[in-house]
Image: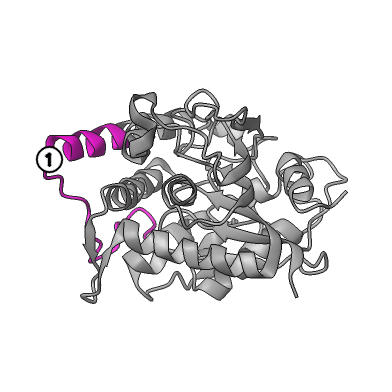
Amino acid sequence: MSRPYATVFIHGLAKKPAPEKLKEIWLWGITRDNPNPAVFPPPNRGINLGSQGVPALFNYYADVFYGTDYETDIQSYYESDNELAILEGEQLDQIEPGLKLPKAVTPRERAFIQNFEAKLGASAALATLPASVATTSEATTPSNDASDLEIASWLPMAVKQAVMKKAAMEAFYFLFDKEYERADGTRFKVRQELRKRLLDDLAKAKEAGEKIVVVSHSMGTMVAYDVARNCPECPAIDTLITIGSPLGIQEVQDELVAIDAGAGGVDFPAAKVRRWINIYDPLDPVAAADPKLAGNFRPVDGKRVEDIKESNWGNWRHTSTHYFAGTQFRRVLRESIGIT
């Protein structure tokens, strides 16, 4: 039986846990009550999609790049009081063996890689807080239990730089629709594959609910926008929520311009999307190059991007579950799925 709403979640960059484990982490991030009350004062109730009768689908594409070599040590997804041991054990500042970094062929491709990495690198440097700030109200107190979350706020610059390299790699292969060969020999035309996966999940959501709400994070916001703007078979999306998005970067926009948009650049995907809300933390290194999107995406039919600033915490502000803890994010999600 179709419900009033169905949700589709799209993850971001880098290797991920297995799909079911990632789904568990994300639902935990949205459901828990009063996360980090020092940053988001109570009451800050969680949202249980299941009890609200809202089907949730999770669009997963990390295996295109990383195969089934899932992130299995979930400890690296939670903050800990033994930071050094995790860093040494996980080698988080390393690029995975077999991961093929982009090789530019044309001047446009070379310019994209150079400028994209430069902008993310500059953002990461600016987003690194002084230790005196990161250990006060701007950061959560480290602990060993699962109430603190995902990629830890204490990650040093070497780790962030490795993440930026992966971001550039994934963005390049997607935006230029390059063929990617995994370490096991499997090949994908990346943009075509990621489009297909999201369109499949959106079709399932259309069957499950009368209205579709999409929540996309990080690199997943590129896929969400591309499908909504450039794929005619995309079903109507009632609300698109982007968090920690790199869509403000000019080089990304240049590769997402639809043919019918012409010299006007990127625009609001009004034919498919009723409302688009962009939530950003100005210290998120992936979004910080240009976190506000309303000035970049031209309004269409009176529709424009709604930018909402919501700071989370720590030195690493890009974490999806940090965004999920926010009172503004939760307000927007409640409104989007019809919860008063």
Please, what is the three-letter code of the amino acid marked with disc 1?
Thr
**The image quarter in which residue 115 lies:** top left
Give the x, y percent position of residue 169: 29, 50
Depth check, front residue: 84 or 209: 209
Residue 249 to residue 173: above or below: above
Q: Residue at x 54, y 32 (%)?
A: 283
- Tell me the residue that label 1 is attached to: 106
Relative horizontal placement of residue 282, taking residue 120 as reference (left or right): right
Quadrant in the rendering for residue 62 = bottom left
- Judge by depth and name the residue closer to the eye, 265 or 319: 265
Give the magenta part as a residue range. Answer: 91-117
Quadrant occupied by the N terminus: bottom right
Q: Is residue 191 above or below residue 186?
A: above
Instruction: Tell me the element at label 1.
Output: loop
The spot of residue 23 in percent (x, y) is 60, 68
Name which residue lies at 36% across and 44% down: 164
Badge 1 crowding class, 10 Å Cα cut-off, few under 14, some 14 to 19, many 20 or more, is few
| In the image, residue 114 lies in the stretch drawn in magenta | yes
Q: Is residue 83 part of the magenta span, yes or no?
A: no
Horizontal side of 246 relative to 328 (left or right) equals left
- Does residue 146 appear in the picture of this structure? no
Looking at the picture, does residue 43 appear above or below residue 30? above
Residue 274 is situated, as x and y percent measured from the top left of the image, at 64, 42
The relative height of residue 59 versus residue 268 in the rendered view (above or below) is below
Q: Please name whichever residue, 267 or 74, is drawn nearer the observer in this view of the structure.
A: 267
